[in-house]
Image (tube, rainbow, N blue to C red):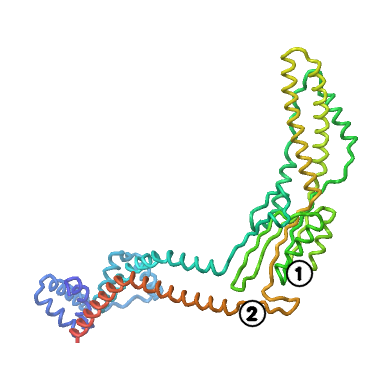
Amino acid sequence: MNCKEIQDNLSAYIDKALPEKEMVLIEEHLSRCPECLEEYEAIKDTINMISSLEEIIPPASFRSRELRQKLEKAAQKQEKPSVQGLIHIWLSKLRTSGLMPVAAALILMLAIVPFMADNIKMGAPQSKQEAGRGMDENLKTKMTYSLADKGVAPNVKAPAPHSYGVAMDQQIQMKNEASMPAPAPLPAAPGVTVKETEKAGAVGTQEASIDRKLIKNADISLRVDNYQAAVESLKNQVLSYGGYITNESVQTTGPEGILNGHLQVRVPQDKFDTFLSGMEGLGKVTGRNIYAQDVTEEYVDVQSRLKAYKTKEERLLAILQKSGQLSDILAVENELANTRAQIEAMEGRLRYLDNRTDFSTIGINIQQTAAPTQKVSTGGLQGVFGKAKEAFIRTINNILLGIGKLIVSFSSALPYLVLIALGLGAGWWWFKKRYSSQK
């Protein structure tokens, strides 16, 4: 024990409240330390002086409440112990109780464990990637059919596989195109006034009489017992109605090889409702979304502007035949080229709107049920022995992969485990030696 601990325990030594062993240690220390002996004599003199004072009887007006208030005020004035003092007290308690080696081992473990976790994670991604590659090959096989020989219309750009929202995307695209501002009026050529052009357009609008233009689309979700039979039936119906297929995708999921796919078709608009009704006999319709877009206003507007530009083109041609100066001829030809470009653009837009309104787009999500519900089928037993063999081999490989990961993790953690074992062994030896010496 050092002088600080001896001086802290002097009061208890005087009151004989310490164990016999500590009493002997303090007595030996006082015999050879003048500083601690002087402190001991000062405390003892203070105690003797206080003991020699006479007992004072408190006045009759004194109450226990007044004493309590004074004691509370005195306690509030006492300073709180500093952090350094708390650490010193904690270390003293650990030293006297013999738990210092255990605390050192715990601190060592807290410092080493994060590094162990980082080392273990370093070897994980590669093994995880190898395992994931094998599982992806066994559980999911994607197949994309070529549509060249399956009735797909020529010059039709097929969407990407799994494009279940193609119909909606096309509708949004058409809305954006419908909101496209009309081309600015071109400068009038010599001899053609703006009023004449607008008058020709107004006459064309009054003479136009067309039916309402609607772009009808649908998204259908269908659950069937036999995927291949349902798809073949749908293709035959589309071809019989004069339609065509724009996209087809299929994939297998699970060890049972359940088929799921998407089929996008276009059928004449007058066969739209008939085709949707015919799908109900192929399986269970689990979802239906039918929507339409009215493009009548855009169609009439483009048609009117097209007639106005054609009238303008005829007048420019007439002026071109009468022009004699070279500068006038060049100006009219330039204006005629611009007018012709506008006419071709509007004619292309009308053809696009006619195609979109004459044919309706239908997206069909087809899902095969795991167990047929319409009739008893032995399809679940087909290839069962081959699937069982694959499952057995896959399980064995996963076990071997897990053993390999365990060996790698243990090898990376082995140096840390050795350090921890040495620290715990040294702490146990020190604790045992100290405990035996105290006995």
N-term-proximal mark, 1 vs 2: 1
**What crowding class fits label 1: few (fewer than 14 Cα within 10 Å), some (14-19), or many (20 or more)?**
some
**Residue 430 is drawn in which quadrant?**
bottom left
Q: Is residue 256 left or right of residue 417?
A: right
Q: Is residue 416 visible?
A: yes
**Residue 67 is drawn in which quadrant?**
bottom left
Q: Secondary structure at mark 1?
A: strand
Where in the figure is residue 226, as x and y percent of width and height? 71, 71
Q: Is residue 417 left or right of residue 207?
A: left
Q: Is residue 215 left or right of residue 109?
A: right
Find disc 1 in the rendering and name its residue.
284
The CA distance from mark 1 to mark 2 is 24 Å
Which residue sits furthest top?
325
Q: Is residue 337 left or right of residue 96?
A: right
Where in the figure is residue 395, as x and y percent of width and height? 49, 77
Q: Secondary structure at mark 2?
A: helix
Residue closest to the eye, 91 or 213? 213
Residue closest to the eye, 68 or 220? 220
Up the image or down, 263 lies above or below 436; here it is: above
Where in the figure is residue 31, as x and y percent of width and height? 9, 77
Which residue sits furthest left?
32
Are discs 1 and 2 less than 8 Å apart at CB? no
**Residue 270 is drawn in which quadrant?**
bottom right
Up the image or down, 226 lies above or below 18; here it is: above
Residue drawn at (65%, 62%), measured in percent from left and top? 250
Find disc 2 in the rendering and name its residue.
381
Amino acid type of the residue tagged 1 in the rendering: Lys
Residue closest to the eye, 53 or 387? 387
Amino acid type of the residue tagged 2 in the rendering: Leu
Q: Is residue 100 visible?
A: no
